Image: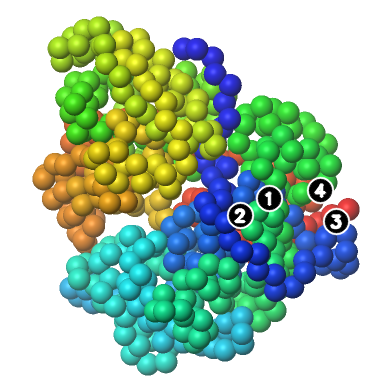
Amino acid sequence: MKTIKYTYLILIVIGLLIVSGCQPAVTQTAAPSPEETSGEQVLVIATEGIPPTLDPLDSNDSRVDTPSINFYSTLTQFEYGTTNLKMELAETSEVSEDGLSHTFTIKKGVKFHDGSELTASDVVYTIDRMIALGTGVYGNMPSITGGEAVDGYTVKINMAQSFPGLEGALTRLYIVNADVVKENEQNGDWGQQWLSTNETGSGPYTLSEFQSEQQLTVEKFPDYFKGWEGNHVDRAIFRVIREEATRQISLENGEVDWIYIGIPDTWEGLKGKEGIILNQDETLNQLYFAFNNQNEFLKDVRIRKALELAFDYQGLVEQVLNGHAVLAKGPNPESILCHDPSMEVTEYNIEKAKELMAEAGFPDGGFELSMVYEATTGETDYFNVMQAGASALGITLIPLEMEWDAKVNAFSSPETAPAMGTIWQFPPYPDPDQYVWSLVNSKNIGGGGTNFAYYSNPRMDELTNAGKSELDPAKRCEIYKQVQQIWTEDVPYANVIIMESLSAQKDYVNGYKWTSPHPLTQQVYHMWLDRKP
């Protein structure tokens, strides 16, 4: 395999993020520099960009999940640094016998940032808003039909069908202040425009400053319902520094306290540096290559399989990523419930790939395929490895560089859909449904869906739909094992790698943990500084 210099991770730099649109500068209070803020614990995090919106409904996007988890609260939440689910705003939950309703009692005395109390009516409004707008986190819980306020502190969530993953999905349904949002609605938009640059939560931090392309500043909310006992950051500044080399220098010089690492060379360059700690964390985020099943060549499973075999997976991890990734075994990570133990890492076998090409009637290749990838997030190297493998089969792979939104738009129509494309799964909660349904259920073909493979199989639709609602754990796992077997036979996607998160911080920063259900986020409440200069 040709040696390729990697601008790793994809992801990680997706992580706080990529700006997808310009937002007007909204400044509520001028944010002082750390040097000017005497007596406060001020954490400075360098990011590649500012979230495209602050609307928590869009927190299925990790770029938006970072501010959301600091501004808002949810009925349920994952324990920091783990995949253990617990109650947050909710005190108790009860599921009806038929699984079609979940009833939650919520804590009394929880205050929104304007001082008003959070009640069941705010939860109902948040649910109604999600259903009415039908975007963002709604895709994680489309079976919800509405909410009812049983009393001031009890809410019942109703569903069209049973949904075993509901409590996990609710960890991204951030509860908004209904009265404040209603006051700021414009032409029936449910407050979308206003919430794009403002917040109205009950979480540990409030918005201090939001300057597009420059920085986002949050500050401590004194009346946060979990309290402030122990060590916590008072203020956090998410500062935009686009170039990784500049972010590295800023960390070394003490201008910032924490950075994501997107390039293995940065990791190596920071090793052993005095006063700097490196963080290396396993994740649940998996990379796939989509094979467009409607393409005149890729409609033949033998050609899809040949391309899958032509990719040097081990070479990618060892030579390009310097070991900072795990090879995928099937369509979801091994740690995910219902993973089939018979799933293996895809082999790299050019000879077998050539045999399949010959069987398909193309022993010398002789055709072109387009492949879309996101160059700005480090995916160029993935394309280069795939291009080299395709070339060995006589296939010319044409590069198409696109940002995520443009990629989704391209795959929205069969007329514009590329032959191949990269796609990641960043699961909002650890469940097999979060990996497979959006990628292979035919409901998600085109129109903004993420079935980039244009894969349609009635049996796969039946299984992935059934897996969403099956309450019996054993039956559910049997469903997903069948899904994995069909996926392996039909090859709608190549299963590539599972990312590893790399970051660096000053040694006076404490409390940072990677939380897999909230990838690429910083939960500032759990972090603190010990004798920052």
Q: Amino acid at mark 4?
A: Glu
Which residue is located at x 62 percent, y 29 percent? 264
CA separation in Å, label 2 and label 3? 28 Å
Residue that lies at the very extreme toward the bottom in this rendered image: 151
Q: Amino acid at mark 3?
A: Arg
- Up the image or down, 520 lies above or below 292; here it is below
Tell me the residue that label 3 is attached to.
531
Which residue is located at x 64 percent, y 58 percent? 212
Q: Earlier in the sequence, mark 3 or mark 4?
A: 4
Give x and y (percent) for residue 79. Answer: 52, 61
- Up the image or down, 263 lies above or below 128; here it is above
Tell me the residue that label 4 is attached to.
255
Label 4: how many Cα within 10 Å (few below 14, some 14–19, many 20+): some
Q: Amino acid at mark 2?
A: Ile
Do labels 1 and 2 touch, CB within 8 Å? yes
- For discs 4 and 1, the disc positioned in front in the rendered view: 1
Which residue is located at x 72 percent, y 34 percent? 245
Label 1: how many Cα within 10 Å (few below 14, some 14–19, many 20+): many
Tell me the residue that label 1 is attached to.
240
CA separation in Å, label 2 and label 4? 18 Å
